[in-house]
Image (cartoon, rainbow, N blue to C red):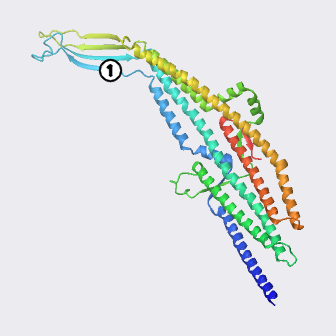
């Protein structure tokens, strides 16, 4: 009698547990379904990688500011080649103070003169060239800014893409775990089943852990999209688009990079690589700065030459005391500076300008060395990442699949342990996620390499 009562109690407890599990499962499925509908409700803009980069570049305020600065500098360069304004002097000369009579003295006159200074040597022309050289830096700085934007936006876009693809992988494997859980549940509920209660609890626990993993990945994806939005979305001052969001297009995302055959030929030829890297905006900026420093040196050398000045004057005189007409007076004068006492200052200026030119030559070599080292590191990383991808595709993933299937077959034939089945499934999922991360890391290296090369052709995600 007591044994029968105990068996009845166990049956009721089992029914209550299974009912609670089914209710919890139903709530969980409903929650996941509602979460999956949220992106459809939001006002989202779907962008692939190329579209995201183009939009970030097209609405970058720094590029607009740089263009205005260039226009300002070039306007100054045009004005710097003009001679300084002439000076006009008007005066009353030799007025007798006893009577203040303009006609009393022959020396009294009303004088008007104009003087014009001529800077030393080619100072004006060189000054205009100096400002023009400063203006030449701005387009190169914008080229570098565009390349940096492409790299930064690509990095953020690929980060969000990796989380999105990881979510897809976890959801696919969650479906497999649900099917596995249903098998365990059916076996446990059957009078002839050999599934243990701990197997049922373990399968439920793994589903909960997968739900938690999905939540973490969704949070990371949203954070990456929010960081990406600072480059893509309009400013918050625009109230009509303040609530706009971003979604990703994940079919055939292009990354701009130089073809692999060109990269391999450059890696084996240092001279060709250096010639290619000299076209990078950072190197060309240093070249322009070096040219500006050379112009500064030429301007300093012009100060050894004298400055010239010409003065033309006209003096009007009144009649004498008897009423006779007096001749008016004309004058011309030439002035010239004699750089005697300022020679030491000019020597110092020329020497400083020469050292500045040499410093830019060293800086150019430094930038080239940094770019070349970065190029070699990136190409080496890409080669090794390709090897890892091939290893995962040809050996690791097939082995993980075979192991998971073997564990499942052993468990269904009562020769295995359920925990081994779960671990094999989780290991297979982690291997797929790891392969995805390796591929994303490779694409990020390609984005960095594209910045180093500053030009290239499209490749697509594979």
Q: Residue 178: which quarter of the image?
A: bottom right
Vertical arrangement, residue 331 with respect to residue 245, above or below: above
Question: Residue 152, relative to residue 108: is it above or below?
Answer: below
> Is residue 83 in sight in this rendering?
yes
**How many numbered callouts?**
1
Considering depth in this image, is 187 or 368 the residue closer to the camera? 187
Q: Residue, x 64% and y 45% (percent of image)?
A: 53
Lateral position of residue 394 relative to residue 129, left or right? right
Q: Is residue 278 above or below residue 8?
A: above
Q: Quick check: can you spot residue 453?
A: no
In x, y percent, where is residue 404? 84, 59
Identify the residue shown where x is 71% and y is 45%: 441
Residue at the spot of label 1: 87
Q: Is residue 367 above or below residue 417?
A: above
**Percent x, y of residue 366:** 60, 28
Residue at point 64% right, 29% down? 369
User: Badge 1, how many Cα within 10 Å: few under 14, some, many 20+?
Assistant: few
Q: Given the current orientation, which residue lies at the most extreme left position?
A: 98
Residue 104 horizontal side relative to residue 257, left or right: left
**Which residue is farthest right?**
413
Position of 9 compared to 46: left or right? right
Give the x, y percent position of residue 335.
34, 11
Where's the N terminus, which quadrant? bottom right
The local secondary structure at tag 1 comes to strand
| Residue that lies at the very extreme toward the bottom in this rendered image | 1
Position of 376 with respect to 423 (left or right) is left
User: Which of 205 and 214 lies nearest the eye of the viewer?
Assistant: 205
Identity of the residue drawn at 82% across and 77% down: 189
Q: Quadrant of residue 324?
A: top left
């Amino acid at each position: 009698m007591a044994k029968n009562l105990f068996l009845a109690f166990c049956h009721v407890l089992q029914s209550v547990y299974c009912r609670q599990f089914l209710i919890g499962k139903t709530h969980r499925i409903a929650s996941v379904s509602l979460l999956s509908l949220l992106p459809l409700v939001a006002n989202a803009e779907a962008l692939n990688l190329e579209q995201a980069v183009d939009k970030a570049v097209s609405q970058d305020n720094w590029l607009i500011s740089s263009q205005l600065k260039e226009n300002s500098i070039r306007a100054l360069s045009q004005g710097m080649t003009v001679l300084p304004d002439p000076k006009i002097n008007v005066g009353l000369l030799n007025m007798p103070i006893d009577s203040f009579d303009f006609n009393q003295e022959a020396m009294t006159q009303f004088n008007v003169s104009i003087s014009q200074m001529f800077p030393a040597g080619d100072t004006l022309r060189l000054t205009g060239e100096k400002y023009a050289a400063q203006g030449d830096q701005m387009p190169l700085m914008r080229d570098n800014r565009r390349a940096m934007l492409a790299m930064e936006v690509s990095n953020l876009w690929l980060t969000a893409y990796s989380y999105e693809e990881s979510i897809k992988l976890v959801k696919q494997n969650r479906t497999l775990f649900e099917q596995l859980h249903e098998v365990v549940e059916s076996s446990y509920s059957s009078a002839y089943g050999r599934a243990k209660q701990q197997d049922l609890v373990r399968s439920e626990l793994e589903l909960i852990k997968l739900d938690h993993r999905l939540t973490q990945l969704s949070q990371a994806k949203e954070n990456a999209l929010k960081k990406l939005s600072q480059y893509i979305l309009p400013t918050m001052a625009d109230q009509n688009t303040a609530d706009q969001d971003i979604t990703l297009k994940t079919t055939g995302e292009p990354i701009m990079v130089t073809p692999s055959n060109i990269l391999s030929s450059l890696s084996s030829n240092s001279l060709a690589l250096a010639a290619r890297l000299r076209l990078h905006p950072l190197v060309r900026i240093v070249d322009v700065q070096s040219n500006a420093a050379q112009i500064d040196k030429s301007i300093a050398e012009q100060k050894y030459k004298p400055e010239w000045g010409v003065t033309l004057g006209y003096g009007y005189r009144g009649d004498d005391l008897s009423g006779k007409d007096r001749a008016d007076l004309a004058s011309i004068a030439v002035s010239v500076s004699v750089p005697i006492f300022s020679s030491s200052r000019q020597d110092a200026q020329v020497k400083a300008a020469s050292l500045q030119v040499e410093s830019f030559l060293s800086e150019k070599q430094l930038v080239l060395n940094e770019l070349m080292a970065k190029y070699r590191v990136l190409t080496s990383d890409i080669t090794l990442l390709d090897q890892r991808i091939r290893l995962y595709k040809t050996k690791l993933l097939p082995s993980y699949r075979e192991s998971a299937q073997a564990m499942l077959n052993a468990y269904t034939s009562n020769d295995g342990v359920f925990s081994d089945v779960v671990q094999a499934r989780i290991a297979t999922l982690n291997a797929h996620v790891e392969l995805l991360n390796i591929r994303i890391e490779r694409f990020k290296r390609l984005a960095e390499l594209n910045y180093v090369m500053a030009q290239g052709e499209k490749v697509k995600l594979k």
